[in-house]
Image (spheres, rainbow, N blue to C red):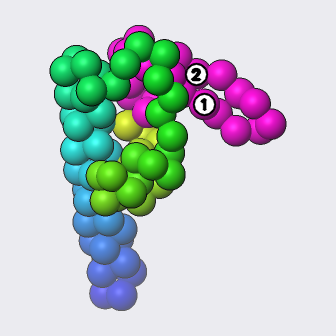
Amino acid sequence: MERHRDRSETRRAERRMSTAATCAHDEIRTRIFSGALEAGARLREKQLVAELGVSRTPIREALRRLHAEDLSSSYRTGGQGRFLV
């Protein structure tokens, strides 16, 4: 019984994370298309966390989705990924 409960809790946490990532993605995407984020602007993880009120993991997933949609580009410096609009 305990094992089943752990799986259920894990699934709920994954859904919340997915929902947070989707909300973050949608908000950043809206900012790109509205012009609130200008071309070439850096997408700073810490700043987005503070502005959107979600943890780093959903922000990272949102940035990956934007990159997959060719709405941002990424590069690495010092072991950290950077994203630009």
Residue 14, x across and y down, in percent: 33, 58
- Indicate the quadrant containing the C terminus: top left, top right, bottom left or bottom right: top left
In the picture of the structure, the residue carrying the numbered disc 1 is: 82
Q: Amino acid at mark 1?
A: Arg
Seen as rendered, the residue at the extreme right is 78
Residue 21 image offset from top left, x and y in percent: 32, 45
In the picture, measured across the screen, residue 80 lies left or right of residue 35, that is right
Q: Is residue 57 magenta?
A: no
Tell me residue 29's x, y (percent): 26, 27
Q: Which residue is mark 2?
A: 74
Q: Which residues are magenta?
A: 63-85
Of mark 1 and mark 2, the one earlier in the sequence is: 2
Nearer the observer, 51 or 64: 51
User: x%, y% of residue 16?
Assistant: 26, 59
Q: Residue furthest bottom?
A: 2
Q: Is residue 17 visible?
A: no
Image height check: is 58 above or below 32?
below
Give me the residue at 28% from left, 71% from top: 8
In contact (CB < 8 Å): disc 1 and disc 2: yes
Q: Say above or below: 60 vs 43.
A: below
For residue 83: magenta? yes
Q: Residue at x 32, y 65 (%)?
A: 13
- Measured in 3D between alpha carbons, the distance from the residue under mark 1 to the one under mark 2, in whole angstroms, is 5 Å
Q: The residue tagged with tag 1: helix, strand or loop?
A: strand
- Identify the amino acid type marked 2: Ser
Give the crowd class for mark 2: few <14, some 14-19, many >=20 residues within 10 Å: some
Q: Is residue 33 visible?
A: yes
